Amino acid sequence: MMRWQERWVEWSQRSEKGAAFSFALRAALASVGAVICVRLLHVTQGMYALIAAVVVSDVAPDAIRHLGYQRLLGTAVGAVLGGVLAVLFGHVLWAVGTAIFLTILICEFLRFRDAAKVGGYVAGVVIIGYAADPWHYARDRFLETAVGIAFAMLVCFVLPVPKATANGTPVVNDLKV
């Protein structure tokens, strides 16, 4: 770790406000970077990259990697199930509920518990949001989410985070924040 990164971590650990500032800055930088990237890739929306970057940004680097990997898998399951049900049944509301139900169930059975919610919402969004081509829309939602996750991980390595407990809460002077 470079000297300035050590100082950053030290400063972030000093107080609850420092830890909050650190998290807010990392989430903001990851979000902006993700949106710029998907715009350069000419993906239809930037909103889902932004959402993924904020949601995956976490206090502990290990948590970011774990959440990122899990949520990427959940996004893939949701995009595929959403695409399949959209092709078979269109925009009908019961297909949205079925896609969400199946995605969450599959993620839970595969022990991707942290992926279930994100996967479920992606499945629903694919069915509700697609225009003429559900597979193109599902691919774009997956790509945007992957870019958001990647930027959250990248920012975590550039701006390291304070030491954290097992549940991800920062430690300030040996007290959980």
Image (cartoon, rainbow, N blue to C red):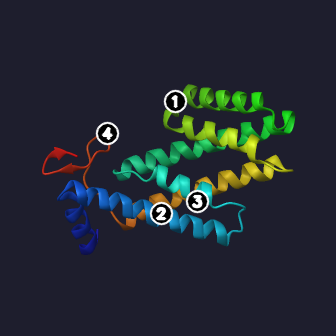
* Kind of element beneath mark 4: loop
Q: Quick one: label 3 or label 2, which is nearer the N terminus?
A: 2
**Amino acid at pointer 2:** Ala
Mark 1 against mark 4, which lies toward the viewer? 4
- Which of discs 1 and 3 lies nearer the camera? The answer is 3
Report, in whole angstroms, how far the alpha carbon at label 4 lies from the one at label 3. 25 Å
Up-down relation of residue 152 to residue 125 (above or below): below
Q: Which of disc 3 and disc 1 is earlier in sequence?
A: 1
- Mark 1 Cα within 10 Å, few/some/many (few <14, many 20+)? few
Q: Are marks 1 and 4 in contact (CB under 8 Å)?
A: no
Q: Which residue is mark 4?
A: 167
Q: Which label belongs to residue 111? A: 1
In the image, what residue type sits under mark 1? Answer: Arg
Query: Residue 155's image quarter?
Result: bottom left
Q: What residue is disc 2 on?
A: 30
63 over 27 or under it: above or below: above
- Mark 1 → mark 3, Cα distance in angstroms: 23 Å
Q: Amino acid at mark 4?
A: Asn
Indicate the secondary structure of the residue bearing disc 3: helix
Mark 2–mark 1 Cα distance, whole angstroms, equals 27 Å
Q: On screen, 21 above or below 117?
A: below
> Residue 101's spot in the image, x, y percent?
65, 27
Residue 48 numbered mark, or none: none
Which SS class for mark 2?
helix
What separation in Å lies between label 1 and label 4 (alpha carbons)? 18 Å
Specify which label sits upstream in the sequence, 1 or 4.
1
- Residue at horizontal 22%, vertical 69%? 7
Which amino acid, by three-letter code, is at mark 3? Val
Q: Reading the chain from its start, which is encountered first: label 2 or label 1?
A: 2
> Dot 3 surroundings within 10 Å: few (below 14), some, or many (20 or more)?
many
Please tell me the numbered disc located at residue 147.
3
